[in-house]
Every structure is written in C-alpha cells, then in structure tokens.
Image: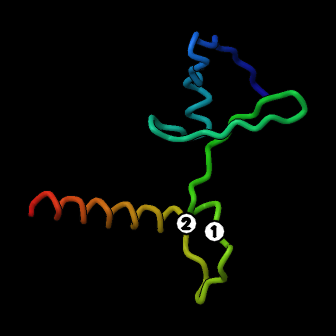
Amino acid sequence: MKETSTTITKKGQVTIPVEIRHSLGLAPGDKVAFVLENNEVKVRPAKSALERSFGAVKPRKSPEDLRELERLAEEAMAEDALRGLKG
C-alpha cells in the first residue's frame, strides 16, 4: 500500500496526486466517491447511474460489456448533438 499526502485548500479541496489518478484511471471531469470507514477515508471512482443499476433487470440475452454500451450511448448522443447543430 502506497501512502501520499496533500494539503486541503481554504475551500476544502484537495488535489489527487497524479500517480493515484493514473492507478484509478481517473481523468479530468471524472467523479470520485469518498467512503468513510473506521475513521479512514477511501477514494474510488464513482459509479455511473448505469453501473449502479446494472443487473437490476435480467437481460433477455447474455449481458454485454458495460463499457461498450456506455461508449455506444455516448457516441449516439454526440451524433444527435451534431445533427442538432447542423440544423
């Protein structure tokens, strides 16, 4: 287990060190979750609404890769947005 420290700003903000961001696969704009357990704070990537509800409904077919489904949904939304801009 590697430990590193950072300083809390006046606004209560902290910078997640680059090596931890890389280890967790975090990028600018990603959300993180803080979990308080036994007087310690754990930081982990936050789950999306899709990830939180995944498995709540049984699939008709075998489940597909969640990341691929998210990628396809984002691609479709981007295409819709472009069509809206073009008129």
Could you tell me the amino acid type at mark 2? Leu
Q: Which residue is tagged 2?
A: 66
**Whether residue 82 is situated above or below residue 57 in the rendered picture:** above
Is residue 16 left or right of 56 when viewed as pictured? left
Quadrant occupied by the N terminus:
top right
**Whether residue 82 is situated above or below residue 43 in the rendered picture:** below
* Location of residue 13 (image quadrant): top right
Residue at 62% x, 46% y is 46
Quadrant occupied by the C terminus:
bottom left
Could you say whether the residue bearing mark 2 is in a helix, strand or loop?
helix
Between 19 and 11, which is closer to the camera in this rendering?
11
Residue 45 is marked as none
- Spot the residue most to the front: 11
Q: How many marks?
A: 2
Q: Earlier in the sequence, mark 1 or mark 2?
A: 1
Is residue 1 left or right of 79 when viewed as pictured? right
**Whether residue 24 is situated above or below residue 54 in the rendered picture:** above
* Location of residue 49 (image quadrant): bottom right
Could you tell me the amino acid type at mark 1? Phe
The answer to whether the residue labelled 1 contacts the one labelled 2, judged by CB atoms less than 8 Å apart, is yes
Q: Which residue is tagged 1?
A: 54
Residue at 47% x, 66% y is 68
Between 10 and 65, which is closer to the camera in this rendering?
10
Could you say whether the residue bearing mark 1 is in a helix, strand or loop?
loop
In whole angstroms, how far apart are the C-alphas of marks 1 and 2?
Answer: 8 Å
Q: Residues within 10 Å of mark 1 (few under 14, many from 20)?
A: few
* Location of residue 79 (image quadrant): bottom left
Residue at 56% x, 20% y is 15
- Spot the residue most to the right: 38
Residue 75 screen position, x and y as percent = 33, 62
